[in-house]
Image (spheres, grey):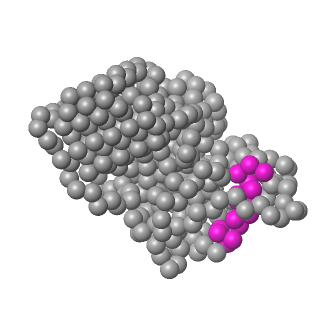
Amino acid sequence: METMMGLINLEHEHHVFNELTYFRNHASIPLAGRYRMIDFALSNMVNSDIQEVAIFTRSKYRSLLDHLGTGENWDLDRRNGGLYILPPDWNDPTDVSKGDLRFFHNNRDYFNRGKSEYVLISGSQFIANTHYQDAFRSHVDRGADVTLISTMAEKLEDEHTPYFRIQADDLGWVQNITNERNNPMVFTGTYIINKSLLMELVDDCIAYNHDYFFVHGIKDRLSELRVQMYRHKGYSAFINSIESFYRHNMNLLTEENYLELFYKPTFVRTKVSNNPPVNYRQPSTVKQSILANGCYIEGEVEGSVLFREVMVNEGTKIKNSIIMQRCKIEEDVYLENVILDKDVHVTKGQRIIGSKDKPYVVAKRREI
């Protein structure tokens, strides 16, 4: 039976997360109360029956290593296959590769030792709960060299700007890959490619001193390859900025979106944490919010996302905000349109108000 191996390539993803990436890379950013951004790409691969996954990561990956551990929460703690974290390891003085081609070149053993003849490559900024088995069957049955996973954007936002747009014929064969901003058919950054072709194109790109595999190996050679499009349908999001991060967390407060993303036969997996249930104390009130285990609530929470072990003291109101793990908020505080990173301490009587377009962000471990 034909199978795929997985690769999450973080090298060329565009992002502007400012305070949220002072101490972590973007794939490690917490999302939706208990997840990290990388959980979605990783879960989609595991749900596609992929049993070996590598991650290309360059910097600030301590938080990522801590979150992923041995891969057991994704059933990737295996004797054969499993999870591979592949940071840069460039000690060959004769190596002339650059960009993400250096990752491919210096981790060639990962691909050579893998038993699968196909590779599913993705980033971490496309947020969806799906699997790619139907796309894989189409890839094999139609004899494609590359299958690009795309999605139709109902409304084009700034977050879509960095992503390529796909133009395909009526049979799904890709005619062009562009930067046309008004084209709603957005390339998700996920694609399936034949492994032997992947390694051949990597070598060719290095020979011509290129630095970006997808652009120079696939986009620029579109006329030479059999490239098809497969459209993802269902709830999805692109998160590559503070604004898109805030907006999509708020979107998940809508029951329909939350159920579409998390309550499907294929579940999104994450690191297990053994916290007690939320402790609601008198006179607390909570409306249309997501609260993770371990929270202690005495105040008022409305339209907000609270991660694990957040403490909200009496007389405090939190509105339209995102409060990450282990934040402590003292009495008589008012927060609106605010993002607090982990372990922030808000002292008594503070009043902080951002806007929905520009939420106020507090970096990790600050006291304000």
Above or below, 328 against 265 in this view is above
259 to the left or right of 166: left
Secondary structure mostly taken by the magenta-highlighted segment of the chain? helix
List the single residue furthest toward the left: 282
Above or below, 268 against 83 in this view is above
104 to the left or right of 297: right
Residue at x 52% of width, y 26% of height: 158
Where residue 237 sits: x, y (%)?
Answer: 43, 38
Residue 217 makes an appearance in the image? no
Q: Is 108 contained in the magenta span?
A: yes
Instruction: Name the residue nearer the viewer: 229 or 213.
Output: 213
Where residue 352 sits: x, y (%)?
Answer: 37, 23
- The part of the chain drawn in magenta is 98-112
Instruction: Name the residue nearer the viewer: 125 or 335.
Output: 335
Above or below, 54 against 214 in this view is below
Where residue 188 sits: x, y (%)?
Answer: 52, 42
Residue 280 makes an appearance in the image? yes
The image quarter in which residue 253 lies: top left
Where residue 102 sits: x, y (%)?
Answer: 75, 56
Labels in figure, total: 0
272 to the left or right of 220: left
The image quarter in which residue 320 lies: top left
Residue at x 22% of width, y 56% of height: 276
Residue at x 34% of width, y 25% of height: 350
List the single residue furthest toward the bottom: 79
Residue at x 85% of width, y 56% of height: 96
Q: Quadrant of the C terminus?
A: top left
